[in-house]
Amino acid sequence: MRTLCAMSLGCNSFKPMKTNKAPLKTSFIWAISAAILGTMVWATVISIFEPLLRGETIDQILSLIVYSLISGVYFGGFIALITVIPYSLLFYGFLKLASKKPSIDFYKKQVVLTSFLLALPFTLVVFFSYVLPTGNLGFSWSDGFSALPWVLISAWAGILLPRFIISSLKPSGNEVAT
């Protein structure tokens, strides 16, 4: 296997993920860092990019940027905080699977794809919380669909960025071969 890998993919060896020692601790660190980074991305996206796409001017955005960032951090941070434990468990299951089948998370492309798939449960929960009727309010499909891309981008970035920052979460493959 090593020779085949070295010849066809240009990598040195096929190593499993480095998280075999303490996957529960690693999954909790990953969930905390994903919550922090996802909240930062959410606040930035909602404060800058979403108003730009709505057609607001730079002056309008800058006049409200501080308030938008603070409200984005409060809202996004609260939602991220309540998902730390469920996502710790999800990441734990993923890390156990990846330690048994290291080929699913070996190259950067696979890390990007698996991070996207891991972001989907959170994105769907937030989407349906926008859409489902509450109290006297009916279904709010427009609110759900307008928030969907921003939630997906924030969750995906929050899950993906720690994979390249935290050494125990980095893919084990040779990055040149991607």
Image (spheres, grey):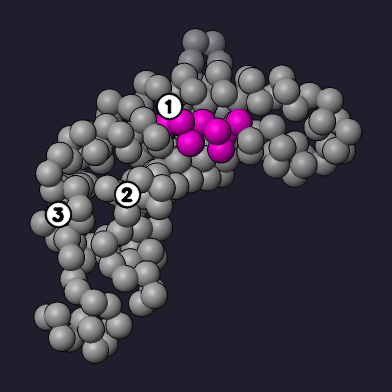
Q: Earlier in the sequence, mark 1 or mark 3?
A: 1
Q: Between 126 and 51, which is closer to the camera in this rendering?
A: 51
Crowding around mark 2 (Cα neighbors within 10 Å: few <14, some 14 to 19, many 20+) is few
Place residue 14 in its image quadrant.
bottom left
Q: Gap between marks 3 and 2, in whole Å?
A: 15 Å
Tag in front: 1 or 3 = 3
Q: Earlier in the sequence, mark 3 or mark 2?
A: 3
What x and y, as percent, mark residue 162?
A: 40, 44
What's the amino acid at mark 2?
Ser
Disc 2 is placed on an element classified as helix
Q: Is residue 157 above or below residue 15?
A: above
Q: Earlier in the sequence, mark 2 or mark 1?
A: 1
Tag in front: 3 or 2 = 2
Residue 42 magenta-drawn? yes
What x and y, as percent, mark residue 28?
A: 27, 32
Q: Which residues are magenta?
A: 35-43
Left or right, 5 with reference to 118: left
Q: Main secondary structure of the magenta part?
A: helix
Q: Which mark is residue 167?
A: 2
Crowding around mark 3 (Cα neighbors within 10 Å: few <14, some 14 to 19, many 20+) is some
What's the amino acid at mark 3?
Ser
Identify which residue is drawn at 48% across, 45% down.
157
What x and y, as percent, mark residue 65?
A: 75, 27
User: Which residue position is annotated with label 3?
Assistant: 99
Q: Gap between marks 2 and 1, in whole Å?
A: 22 Å
Farthest top residue in view: 135
Q: Which mark is residue 80?
A: 1
Quarter of the picture holding the C terminus: bottom left
